[in-house]
Image: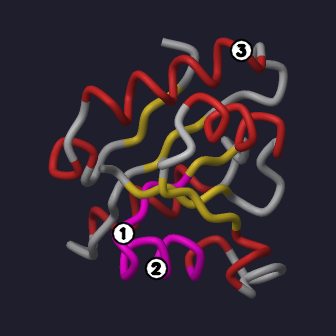
Amino acid sequence: MIKLLADENFDNTIVRGLLRRNPKIDIVRVQDMGLSGIDDPSILAWAAKQNRVLLTHDVATITRYAYERIEQNLPMNGVVEVPMDASIGKAIEDIFLLIECSSEEELQGQIHYLPF
């Protein structure tokens, strides 16, 4: 199963909704891993080391750093960008669909924008 990392400001309602949908989803939050306040490149590096796809609302900066990792041939397990104004239910459904219907290899080096 695909492992997820929820960015520091990611909506916890979405995280709880994913876990309600499937309690076996492997999802951790940045703040639970002691990574609060660190910069975006470090978050992406940590996610890569842990083989986790990053869930974020940060469309402004994460995308740039993710592409920089790809250009430098550094591992990047994937990013899922969810707009802040996205419907909670739609975000949960789309993330769930993505992790249930994709493999880890398919998401590597990819940035997905929700909603689909």
Kind of residue sitting beneath label 2:
Ala
Kind of residue sitting beneath label 1:
Arg
Write the residue at 43% across / 33% down. Answer: 112
Q: Position of residue 39 (x, y in %)?
A: 70, 78
Q: Mark 2 and mark 1 in contact (Cβ < 8 Å)?
A: yes
Q: Position of residue 95 (x, y in %)?
A: 51, 29
Q: Place residue 67 in its image quadrant.
A: bottom left
* Chain-order first, disc 3 or disc 2: 2
Which structural element holds mark 2? helix
Q: Is residue 77 above or below residue 43?
A: above
Q: CA distance from mark 1 to mark 2?
A: 9 Å
Write the residue at 30% across / 50% down. Answer: 1
Residue bounds of the magenta highlight: 42-54
**On residue 69, which mark appears?**
1
* Chain-order first, disc 1 or disc 2: 2
Q: Is residue 69 above or below residue 108?
A: below
Q: Main secondary structure of the magenta part?
A: helix
**On residue 45, which mark appears?**
2
Frontmost of labels 3 and 2 is 3
Q: Position of residue 96 (x, y in %)?
A: 48, 28
Q: Mark 3 and mark 1 in contact (Cβ < 8 Å)?
A: no
Kind of residue sitting beneath label 3:
Gly
Frontmost of labels 1 and 2 is 2
Which structural element holds mark 1? helix
- The residue identified by callout 3 is 89
